[in-house]
Amino acid sequence: MQENEADEALMHRVQSGNQGAYRVLVQRHAARYHSLIYRYTQNSALTDDVLQEAFVKLWTKPHLFDGSKAKFTTWFHRVCVNGALDEGRRKRFEAIPEDFDVASHDIAADEQIIQDQTAQHVRTLVKKLPPRQRMAVTLSYLEDMSNKAGAAAMDIKLKAFESLLARARKSLQSKLNQDLNR
């Protein structure tokens, strides 16, 4: 039964043109990779586009997957990461947040307001990081991936991934310190 098959076996079937195996892979992994891409793009429509392109690539170019070199999830992480990075390189207008006109009926405590402002400030600073550093931060801290898995998803060596994280942390720390001293 396809629902119980390993991803790699399903990919072998997809490589043979099996639509059912493709459908199982999409159902099994769409939410996970949607979350990954959204955490990087912070844009629902853009996330949907990137994810759709990744699944189209899975269907139209299944021969690019080599089960002897990587697990399906590692390979598909790479496809999604590359798609998100490619989208990030394109110039886009800043979209109005989807909930811009929704009034909050909650009365937030001062502490919550400060935490929210700090979190938003950090998200803004992360958005300003170079794309590869931003992706490393996304994979490591938001996707909770190990450095090894993050390096595999970005198709780089572990030391290079760790270097991206170190540079990103140093840059964020420096910018936060500058902002605190203003």
Image (tube, rainbow, N blue to C red):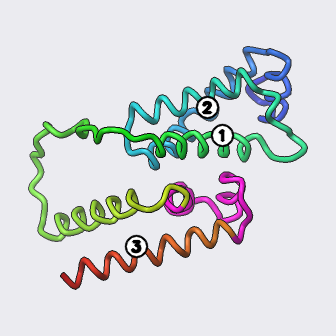
- Residue 176 figure quarter: bottom left
Depth check, front residue: 130 or 27: 130
For label 3, the SS is helix
**Quadrant of the image containing the N terminus:** top right
Boundaries of the magenta span: 133-159
Report the side of 145 relative to 107 (left or right). right
Residue 75 magenta = no
**Label 1: few (<14), some or many (≥20) within 10 Å?**
many
Please give the residue where the numbered disc 2 appears in the rendered image: 54
Residue type for callout 1: Val
- Check the image and report above or below for 129 versus 1: below
Which of the two labelled residues, at mark 2 and mark 1, occupies the earlier sequence position? 2
Point out which mark residue 166 bears.
none
**Label 3: few (<14), some or many (≥20) within 10 Å?**
some
Instruction: Name the residue at the right extreme.
Output: 68
CB within 8 Å, label 2 to label 1: yes
For label 1, the SS is helix
For label 2, the SS is helix
Which of the two labelled residues, at mark 1 and mark 3, occupies the earlier sequence position? 1
Q: Residue at x 57, y 39 (%)?
A: 83
Point out which mark residue 172 bears.
3
Point out which mark residue 79 bears.
1
Image coordinates for residue 62, horizontal then vertical, percent: 78, 27
Image coordinates for residue 2, horizontal then vertical, percent: 78, 23
Residue type for callout 3: Leu
Instruction: Name the residue at the bottom extreme.
Output: 181
Q: What is the C-alpha distance between the residues marked 1 and 3?
A: 27 Å
Which of the two labelled residues, at mark 2 and mark 3, occupies the earlier sequence position? 2
Q: Residue at x 65, y 45 (%)?
A: 77
